[in-house]
Amino acid sequence: QVQLVESGGGLVQVGGSLRLSCAASGNILSFNTMNWYRQAPGKQRELVATITRGGRTDYLDSVNGRFGIWRDNTKNTIYLDMNTVKPEDTAVYYCNLQRLSGPSFWGQGTQVTVSS
């Protein structure tokens, strides 16, 4: 069992920046992908960013070029740098770790609110 603890959410103005962190209790490199999802009120949860074990990254089109996912293997922590934020980025952001098989693990979520 792996516990994930997210932090860094809060209130940010349009055009501002925020860094989310996800600290894992286990070795993140034992997972195939490390992901950030988000869920806005009344909407389905969507995949925002992925970083693979090998370091390849992928992004939701609407955040590509504004958000950056990266990790610190020595700290077993995954980060999401959010830049030039927009009101539509307002959501609860969740960290997720997945293997090719078996259960995936989720954090408790951190609220990000972008104010105009």
Image (tube, rainbow, N blue to C red):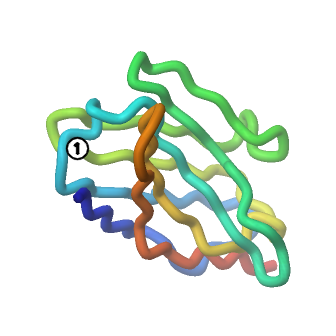
**Image coords of residue 89 (percent x, y):** 74, 64
Residue positioned 70% across, 70% down in the render: 39
Q: Circle 1 — which element? A: loop
Along the viewing direction, whichever of 44 and 89 lies nearer the viewer: 44
**Image coords of residue 44 (percent x, y):** 79, 68
Along the viewing direction, whichever of 86 and 52 lies nearer the viewer: 52
| Quadrant of the image containing the N terminus | bottom left
Task: Name the image quarter holding residue 46.
Answer: bottom right
Residue positioned 75% across, 36% down in the render: 64
40, above or below 1, in the image: below
- Residue 12 lies left or right of residue 74; in this view the side is right
- Residue 1 lies left or right of residue 35; in this view the side is left
**Image coords of residue 47 (percent x, y):** 68, 50
**Image coords of residue 18 (percent x, y):** 53, 60
48, above or below 55, in the image: below
Is disc 1 surrounded by few (<14), some (14 to 19) or many (20+) residues within 10 Å? some
| Quadrant of the image containing the C terminus | bottom right
Q: Residue furthest front?
A: 102
Residue identifier under label 1: 76
Along the viewing direction, whichever of 13 and 78 lies nearer the viewer: 78
Residue positioned 22% across, 44% down in the render: 76
Task: Name the image quarter holding residue 53.
Answer: top left
- Residue 71 lies left or right of residue 34; in this view the side is left
Along the viewing direction, whichever of 104 and 5 lies nearer the viewer: 104
- Residue 36 lies left or right of residue 78; in this view the side is right
40, above or below 60, in the image: below
Residue type, mark 1 in image: Asn
Residue positioned 76% across, 41% down in the render: 60
The image shows a total of numbered marks equal to 1
